[in-house]
Image: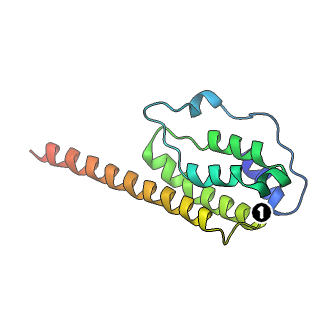
Amino acid sequence: MKLLRNVKKLLEGDKLQVSPFPYDVASAQNGPNTILIYQNLIRFLRNSRAARIFGVCRTLDEYLLSMASDNIVGAIISSLECRKILLELSSKLGLADNQALRDALRADEERVEALLLRNFSMLSKLHSTEDS
């Protein structure tokens, strides 16, 4: 949550203060069950020239780590706030009309769709085996 406050401060024009890795980095390791929503969008922003100029690269790195979830439902629920913050940040950085940003966002949203379909499919199979 501290990172979200820092990004909101940046969006409001305040000086951004980021403490080094305030999140449980161990929980964000790329394990077999880790789900990262909007990772392409964050990486696009992180690699942009504007992010380097405004000094938000480390914040974006930490954000990528902090948004890891070990379950589909938690990841999708938190993704709405993440998307909002990332799109506001992209606008603030002057990247809102960038085609590469739209491509990264589309790839991430396709991933969300695939996760939802996979989850619904698993639930459907679970219910069909319970009914048998």
Which residue corresponds to the image point at 84% horizontal and 63% vertical from the top-left?
A: 12
Q: Amino acid at mark 1?
A: Leu
Which residue corresponds to the image point at 12% horizontal and 47% vertical from the top-left?
A: 131
Q: Residue furthest bottom?
A: 97
Q: Residue furthest right?
A: 15
Q: Is residue 116 left or right of residue 74?
A: left
Q: Quadrant of residue 104?
A: bottom right
* Foreground pick, 94 / 16: 94
Which residue corresponds to the image point at 23% horizontal and 51% vertical from the top-left?
A: 124
* Foreground pick, 114 / 80: 114
Q: Quadrant of residue 49?
A: bottom right
Coloring scheme used:
rainbow
Q: Is residue 9 left or right of residue 108?
A: right
Which residue corresponds to the image point at 22% horizontal and 44% vertical from the top-left?
A: 126
Q: Residue furthest left?
A: 132
Q: Quadrant of residue 17?
A: top right
SS for callout 1: loop
Where is mark 1, residue-wise?
93
